């Protein structure tokens, strides 16, 4: 069972958030939520579920849209004055960092992201969103306005009993390095994008 550990302040360029640490002792993973404002008021909360992407979030990789989505979500929450980001430790759609680098190599040879994962013996998307429910429950959240392009996240939260009252698109710009990645997300994983022109 997911355990809450501790909270603290997190000053950022988008304002001061609260950061909350959680531990999943069975999987040996630590997860965080960053929040701003009163999350437990009962009103729908602007929320982002974000899976860890070291290459995109911290290193500025142009191969994906992860870092841009994370930063845009933080900016929107700051502008709203209220919201939450659940930051889940499931790198590379759940296959891990080193396997993601292996998948990158296969992509360099012509595979798309789904094909690369499958050639390594994984599913197209191995992520598990079940830990979102206890994290949101700890924060007092029952209704969300979900910032996502991924219908699977919406369906996962609904199945967990979370009321997704609205989807807020969160689309980053495409570039020559990620246009195939984004096209694969749309074509094979059902992500909802408006335009994928470079």
Image (cartoon, helix red, strand yellow):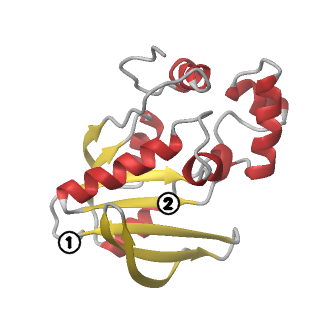
Residue in view at x 36 percent, y 46 percent: 72
SS for tag 2? strand
Q: x, y (%) of residue 27?
A: 69, 68
- The residues tagged by marks 1 and 2 sit, at their Cα atoms, a distance apart of 19 Å
Q: Mark 1 packing: few (<14 Cα in 10 Å), some, or many (20+)?
A: some
SS for tag 1? loop
User: Which numbered disc flags the more N-terminal residue, 1 or 2?
Assistant: 1
- Is 62 rendered above or below residue 85? above
Question: Left of 177 or right of it: where is 193?
Answer: left
Q: Is residue 163 visible?
A: no
Q: Mark 2 packing: few (<14 Cα in 10 Å), some, or many (20+)?
A: many
Residue in view at x 60 percent, y 50 percent: 53
Mark 2 — residue? 87
- Mark number displayed over residue 38: 1
Residue in view at x 39 percent, y 59 percent: 85
- Is 60 rendered above or below residue 1? above
Q: Which of these two is toward me, 13 or 6?
A: 13
Q: x, y (%) of residue 5?
A: 51, 84
């Amino acid at each position: 069972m997911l355990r809450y550990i501790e909270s603290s302040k997190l000053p950022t360029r988008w304002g001061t958030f609260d950061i909350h640490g959680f531990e999943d002792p069975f999987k040996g993973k630590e997860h965080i939520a960053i929040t701003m404002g009163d999350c437990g008021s009962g009103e729908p909360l602007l929320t982002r579920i974000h899976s860890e992407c070291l290459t995109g979030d911290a290193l500025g990789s142009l191969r994906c849209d992860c870092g841009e989505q994370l930063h845009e979500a933080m900016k929107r929450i700051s502008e709203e004055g209220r919201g939450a980001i659940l930051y889940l430790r499931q790198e590379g759609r759940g296959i891990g960092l080193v396997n993601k680098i292996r998948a990158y190599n296969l992509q360099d040879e012509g595979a798309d992201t789904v094909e690369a994962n499958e050639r390594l013996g994984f599913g197209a998307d191995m992520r598990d969103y079940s830990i979102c429910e206890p994290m949101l429950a700890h924060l007092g959240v029952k209704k969300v306005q979900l910032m996502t392009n991924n219908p699977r996240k919406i369906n996962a939260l609904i199945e967990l009993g979370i009321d997704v009252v609205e989807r807020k698109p969160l689309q980053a710009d495409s570039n020559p390095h990620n246009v195939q990645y984004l096209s694969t997300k749309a074509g094979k994983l059902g992500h909802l994008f408006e335009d994928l022109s470079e």
